[in-house]
Image (tube, rainbow, N blue to C red):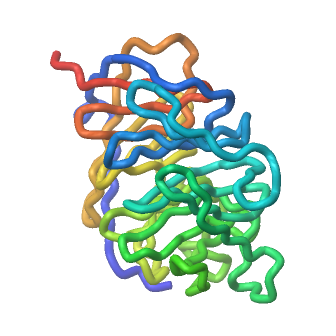
């Protein structure tokens, strides 16, 4: 694929460091894997321990729980990722090789699964994450074939990219993807960050300083999460400047699974809860 734009990624852990203080924690889970936050302030949490999706408010009150172990529609076997747009919730159901779509109250709408279909280009297995563009296109990170697939909102296959034939932009160790507000696809691949445009053209591939395993977004704010660190950035295609956050007040040996930056707050997901940090005034 053709490199169409240069991207400068600056990760500075000193100059841009910011202090955040633990304010509270919400929710109780058994093995949470991923979460997203709606514009109304509700959290949607995927819990692999119970194979359920939870909708909770900012106080931790459980409003809805849905799912349970199984392979039929509305059931899960390792819900590894959850994402949303203004209308729907998308759950990546890894071991069932599917993406399930729900409304904001977690009522089931549809299920996309292509692994056993006739079109090899459209087939995905053991998906790791999925996200939707502002135009309604669904992008799926396919770990079985190490590539990204693009579908429309009705499940019609459009294209696949990032595979073995993508040259410098071939995906080797996929972990997670997000689609930015400007419709760029960011893929966490091993210790690299790969950026594609919405047509599947590779833009850049940049080495990262830590072994991050989650990349998340809330509007235009992006976070990178390792087991003990969170970096935050506002996405700009010409320059991404990540800053490492200093988090205070955590219990010892706390391990993160994902994070979200929301204005002057940061939410960090662990196996069992969501920690809320506020920007320190000092």
x then y, percent, for residue 12 = 31, 39
Q: Residue at x 76, y 67 (%)?
A: 125
Is residue 216 found left or right of 93 in the rendered image?
left
Is residue 14 found left or right of 267 in the rendered image?
left
> Visible in this render: residue 167?
no
Q: Residue at x 50, y 43 (%)?
A: 44
x then y, percent, for residue 63 = 50, 35
Q: Residue at x 52, y 31 (%)?
A: 62
Picture mark count: 0
Q: Residue at x 30, y 40 (%)?
A: 262
x then y, percent, for residue 24 = 39, 17
Q: Is residue 146 above or below residue 176?
A: below
Is residue 93 found left or right of 229 in the rendered image?
right
Q: Is residue 75 above or below residue 277?
A: below
Instruction: Examine the image and state in which quarter residue 73 appears.
Output: bottom right
**Quarter of the figure with the C terminus:** top left
Using the image as rendered, state which of residue 127 and residue 234 is in the foreground. 127
> Visible in this render: residue 46?
yes
Using the image as rendered, state which of residue 268 and residue 165 is in the foreground. 268
x then y, percent, for residue 178 = 47, 59
């Amino acid at each position: 694929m053709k490199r169409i734009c240069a991207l400068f990624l600056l990760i500075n852990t000193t100059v841009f460091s910011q202090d955040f203080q633990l304010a509270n924690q919400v929710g109780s889970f058994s093995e949470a894997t991923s979460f997203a936050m709606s514009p109304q302030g509700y959290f949607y949490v995927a819990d692999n321990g119970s194979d359920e999706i939870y909708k909770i408010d900012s106080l931790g009150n459980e409003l809805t729980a849905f799912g349970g172990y199984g392979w039929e529609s509305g059931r899960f076997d390792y819900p590894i990722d959850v994402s949303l747009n203004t209308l729907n919730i998308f759950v990546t159901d890894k071991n069932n090789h599917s993406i399930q779509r729900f409304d904001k109250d977690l009522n089931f709408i549809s299920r996309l699964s292509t692994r056993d279909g006739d079109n090899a280009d459209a087939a995905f297995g053991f998906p790791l994450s999925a996200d939707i563009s502002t135009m309604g296109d669904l992008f799926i990170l396919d770990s079985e074939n190490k590539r990204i697939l693009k579908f429309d909102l009705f499940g019609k296959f459009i294209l696949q990219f990032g595979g073995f034939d993508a040259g410098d932009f071939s995906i080797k160790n996929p972990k997670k993807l997000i689609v930015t507000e400007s419709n760029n696809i960011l893929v966490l691949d091993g210790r690299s960050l790969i950026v594609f445009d919405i047509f599947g053209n590779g833009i850049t591939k940049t080495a990262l300083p830590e072994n991050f395993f989650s990349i998340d977004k809330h509007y235009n704010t992006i976070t990178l999460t390792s087991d003990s660190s969170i970096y935050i950035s506002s996405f700009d295609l010409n320059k991404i400047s990540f800053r490492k956050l200093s988090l205070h007040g955590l219990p010892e040996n706390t391990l993160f699974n994902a994070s979200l930056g929301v204005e002057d707050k940061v939410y960090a997901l662990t196996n069992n809860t969501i920690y809320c940090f506020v920007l320190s005034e000092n």
